Image (cartoon, helix red, strand yellow):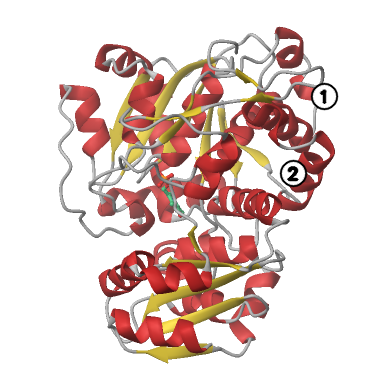
Amino acid sequence: MGAGRKFSGGKNGIFYMQYYSTKGQVKPVSFKDAVLKGLPEDNGLYMPESIPILSEEFLKELSEKSFQDIAIEIVSGFVEDEIKKSDLEKIVHSAFDFDVPLINIHDNIFVLETFHGPTLAFKDFGARFMARVMGHFLQNESKEVNILVATSGDTGSAVAQGFLGVEGIKVTLLYPKGKVSKIQEQQLTTIGQNVTALEVDGTFDDCQTMVKEAFLDKELKEKLNLSSANSINIARLLPQSFYYLYAYSLVADYPEDIIFCTPSGNFGNLCAGVLAWKMGLPVKKFVAATNINDIVPTYLDTGLFNPKGSVRTLSNAMDVGNPSNFPRILDLYDGSHEKMSGHMIGKVYGDKQTKEIIKSVYKKYDYVLCPHSAIGYQGLFDTLEERGMNEKGVFISTASPAKFGDIVEPVIKEKVEVPERLQKIVKRKKQAVSMGNQPGDLKSYLLNS
Ligand SMILES: *Cc1c(COP(=O)(O)O)cnc(C)c1O
C-alpha cells in the first residue's frame, strides 16, 4: 500500500483505499462510493489502486485461521479505515455463517464446495457480503433504498437472499414468466419480508430493459432512491478471494504452491483467485475451465479477445459470450497477454463430455458433480495429468448438483439428494406480482406499491 492512499490528515487520520476505473476516464473513488455506485460512469470496472500484500507471518499461520479470520484480514486491507473493525467483524460473521468443506476426491485432487449457502451456489458469498456492506453504508440514510434486479435465475435469488432482512433496503426482482426452472422460481418467489418478485410476461431481455429504463427515469430515481446490485460490484468480487486462501490453508503449507481450477463464465470467481495470488497466495497455475463459450481459453492461446453471442449449454450459468471480468483479470497481469498466458491454462469441454465426466466421477469416486463443477474437475485433472500428476490441485465446485437434478439424475441413474432447506423452499407458496413487459408497467407498479 502507500502510493494510492489518501490520508485525511489529523492525529486520528483515516486511510482510504482508492478505487480506479479500468477505463481510466473518471476520478478514483472511495470503497464506499465504489460499492454504492457499482459501475464507474465510463463503463469500466472499479479496481483497488494498490493490492494489500499479506504478511509472511499471516500466510505461514493460515492453517490455524478460520474462514472468518481470513475474511476479516483481507477485507481490512481493502477498506482500510472506512469500516470500523468491530462492524467489519459483524458483517463477516453474519455473511458467512455456512460451511465451506474441502474434500479429497482422489489422489491430489481436492474440491472446495462453495455451495452451502442459502441458494446452493457460490454466488451467495458475493451477494451476502455486498448486501451487508451496502446496508452498513446506508444505515444512516433516512430514505429507504430500492434495489432493482433483473434475473434469468440464479443471480436474483442469491442477491435477494443476501439482502433479506437488511434494514432500510427493499428489493424488487424481475424474472421472465415460464423461463426459469421450477426450483429457481420457488427460490425467487418465496423469500418474503423486504423482497418482492415480479413475474414479467416477457423475456429476460425485457426484464433487463425495464430495469435500465427505471434507472434512467428521473421521477423514479428521486422518489425511490434506486440502487443497483450489479454483478460486477467490487463488494461481490472481494469475498470470493477469501475461499482461495481458505482452501490453500487446508491442503498446503506455505510456501508450497498449488494449482487452482475454476469453472468460469463471467470470470468473477477466477478473477478473485488471481486477486488472492496478487496478495501473496502461492499459486503455481490457474486453470480457466469453460464450456464451449471459450472466449478466454481462446484468448490465452491466441492473444485475441473476441466476444461473441453466448451459446446455450448444460452448464448454463457459464453461458457467457463476453466475460465481463476479463478486463480486471488482464489488469492484474499488468495488461500483458504473455504474463497471463504464462500463469493461466485454458480448458474447454462440451456438453457430451460434461455428462461423461459426471458419470465417470460418480462411478469411480462416488461423488456427484453439477454440470459446472464437472468442467472444473476435468480441467484440473487434465492439467495435473499433463504435468505428471505430482502436484496438488483444488477445483472450485460452484453449485450443488441438487439444483440440476434434471440433468444429473438421468446421467448417474440415481436420485440426487435434495438438501432440507431446498425441500422447504419447494413446498412454500409462490408469491409473485404479475406484470406486463413494458417499462411503464414497472414504473406504475413502483410508484403505487
Ligand atoms: C455464476 C456461476 C458460474 C460462473 O461464475 P463466474 O464468476 O461468472 O465465472 C459457474 N457456476 C455456477 C453454478 C454459477 O452460478
Q: Amino acid at mark 1?
A: Glu
Q: Is residue 364 left or right of residue 206?
A: right
Kindly identify which residue carries mark 2.
Answer: 92
Dots 2, 1 in contact, CB < 8 A: no
Q: Is disc 2 placed on a helix, strand or loop?
A: helix
* Of the image marks 2 and 1, the number of the one nearer the N terminus: 1
Q: Position of residue 312 (x, y in %)?
A: 24, 60
- Asked whether the viewer can see residue 111, the reply is no
**Distance between the Cα atoms at labels 2 and 1?**
18 Å
Please give the name of the residue rendered at 62% of the width and 52% of the height, measured from the top-left corner.
134
Q: Is residue 196 left or right of residue 385?
A: right
Give the total of numbered labels.
2
- Residue placed most toward the observer, 421 or 138: 138
- Asked whether the viewer can see residue 83, the reply is yes
Q: Nearer the viewer, mark 2 or mark 1?
A: 2
- Residue placed most toward the observer, 130 or 109: 130
Q: Is residue 60 above or below residue 263?
A: above
Label disc, if present, on residue 197 of the rendered structure: none
Please give the name of the residue rendered at 59% of the width and 14% of the height, measured from the top-left corner.
280
Indicate yes or no: mark 2 CB to ligand 1 under 8 Å: no
Q: Amino acid at mark 2?
A: Val
Please give the name of the residue rendered at 49% of the width and 51% of the height, measured from the top-left corner.
363
Kindly identify which residue carries mark 1.
Answer: 64
Q: Position of residue 256 (x, y in %)?
A: 61, 10
Q: Position of residue 95 (x, y in %)?
A: 71, 51
Disc 2 packing (10 Å; few <14; some 14–19; many ≥20): many
Q: Is disc 1 placed on a helix, strand or loop?
A: helix
Q: Quadrant of residue 439?
A: bottom left
- Residue placed most toward the observer, 199 or 15: 15
Please give the name of the residue rendered at 81% of the width and 17% of the height, measured from the top-left corner.
11
Q: Position of residue 360 (x, y in %)?
A: 42, 48
If the image is split into quadrants, where does the N terminus sit? top right
